[in-house]
Amino acid sequence: MVILYAILSVIIISLASVLAAIPLLIKKKPSEKLLLFLLSLSVGVIMSTVFFILMPEISEHHYTLEVGFYILLGFFLMFILEKLIHWHHSKQHACGHGHGYSLAPINLIGDGVHNFIDGMVVAGAYVANVTLGIAATISILFHEIPQEIADFGVLLYSGFSKKKALLFNFLSAATAIIGTIVGLILASKIHGFTHFMLPFAAGNFLYIAASNLLPELHRHCKLKDSLFHLLAITIGILIIVIVTLFGPAHVH
């Protein structure tokens, strides 16, 4: 059942890349307010997943220097990945191609690697317990929707047709399925895989919230915007609290 839950969850996450792009396919750009709501919701979901579910699960096996290293590894691996993507963007821009087509390959590769890691996180979470797997799935799903909309826009800017952009965006998102399969295999072959994967996921999630999501919210600093963000973050926290309190019993 754990394998079924993990595969089904990551398929839903991958399909989100297609569903998120539908407004752009019908020439209706998603409102900024909706995207900011999703971003704020993601902050609440991701941070509460880390502190209400991941950290308590990690602490059951004692918090050690090794665990702290794995958290930092998850954080800085995402930092390095983004640095490589931004460096490649600036390098291509400096070459003066005049067209954004060169952005497409590195965008797809970077997104594919990110989604592969997401898949491994889902696998590790479900192997630990079902409730944690559900929480991790919700966290990834909410931050993937605005991310996939942005990625789809990059592909269109790069000269892809809408059908081609949709196809490649989905293929990039589908690497999460491969990541989940690899994660499940590693979990069955390597003793203590979840002891590495859970703190790694915590670091990964903390980076996404602190580096990608919160800075974007700080760009909208009116009191009305801030209250709207806080409301959405609170809703995100409540979603994970409900999952924690009423989710399936822990299955190891």
Image (tube, helix red, strand yellow):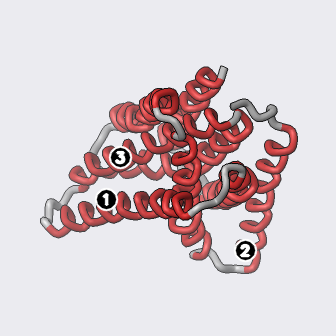
How far across and how far down the image is residue 42, in percent? 65, 55
Report the disc number at residue 156: 3
Q: Is residue 50 left or right of residue 84?
A: right
The C terminus, quarter of image: top right
Question: As rendered, which of 142 and 228 lies closer to the eye?
Answer: 142
How far across and how far down the image is residue 178, in percent? 42, 30
Looking at numbered disc 1 in the image, what kind of residue is underneath it?
Ile
Marks 1 and 2, how far apart in space?
30 Å
> Do residues under tags 3 and 2 come within 8 Å of each other at their CB atoms?
no
Task: Using the rendered view, name the quadrant where residue 210 is placed.
Answer: bottom right
Marks 3 and 2, how far apart in space?
31 Å
* SS for dot 3: helix
Q: Earlier in the sequence, mark 3 or mark 1?
A: 1
> Do residues under tags 3 and 1 come within 8 Å of each other at their CB atoms?
no
Marks 3 and 1, how far apart in space?
18 Å
Residue located at (67% from left, 55% from top): 62
Q: Residues within 10 Å of mark 1 (few under 14, many from 20)?
A: some
